[in-house]
Image: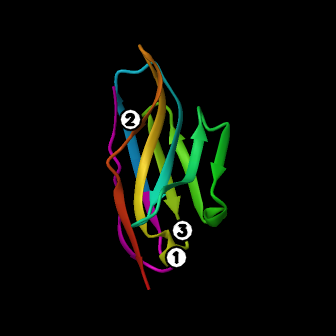
Amino acid sequence: QVHLVESGGGLVQVGGSLRLSCPASGAFYSINAMGWYRQRPGTRRDLVAEIIRDGSATNYADSVKGRFTISRDTAKNTVYLQKNSLKPEDTGVYYCYARARTGVGEYYYWGQGTQVTVSS
């Protein structure tokens, strides 16, 4: 089992910045990818950014390229999302995920989510 707890969400004005954090804990052999999804009310959960293994590869949604930066501290099993130049459309619940290899295989695990609200 892998436990993820997001932090760093909140209310921010347009153009502001936030930094989300998500440490992973529990029993696992390795974490092969971590990332962030966003969900707005009444919509599906969409990928925002993800980082593979030690950061050798990253992937961003087109809407956040150039504004958001994902990073990972492998020693702490923690993923971060630096969000700059925030826009109202960045509002939503941000969920952290980890693709981890455990004793029974490789699975995706999710955090509980953290609310981000960008006000104009």
Residue matched to label 1: 87
* Inter-mark Cα distance, 1 to 3: 9 Å
Element on which disc 2 rests: strand
Pointer 1 with pointer 2, Cβ within 8 A: no
What residue lies at 48% left-to-right and 80% top-to-bottom?
A: 14
Amino acid, disc 2:
Ala
Query: Which residue lies most toward the front here?
Result: 42
Residue position marked by numbered label 3 in the rendering:
84
Q: Which residue type carries mark 1?
A: Lys
Q: CA distance from mark 1 to mark 2?
A: 28 Å
Query: How far apart are the alpha carbons under marks 3 and 2?
Result: 24 Å
* Among the two numbered marks 1 and 2 on one chain, the one whose residue lies closer to the N terminus: 2
Which picture quadrant has residue 55? top right
Q: Is residue 104 toward the left or the right of residue 34 in the image?
A: left
Taking the spot 46% from the left edge, 28% from the top edge, the residue there is 107
Tag 3 near tag 2, CB within 8 Å: no
Coordinates of residue 81 in the picture (x, y in percent): 50, 54
**Are there few (<14), some (14-19), or many (20+) residues within 10 Å of tag 1?**
many
Q: Nearer the viewer, mark 1 or mark 3?
A: 1
Q: Which mark is residue 24?
A: 2
Segment tinted magenta in the rendering = 1-19
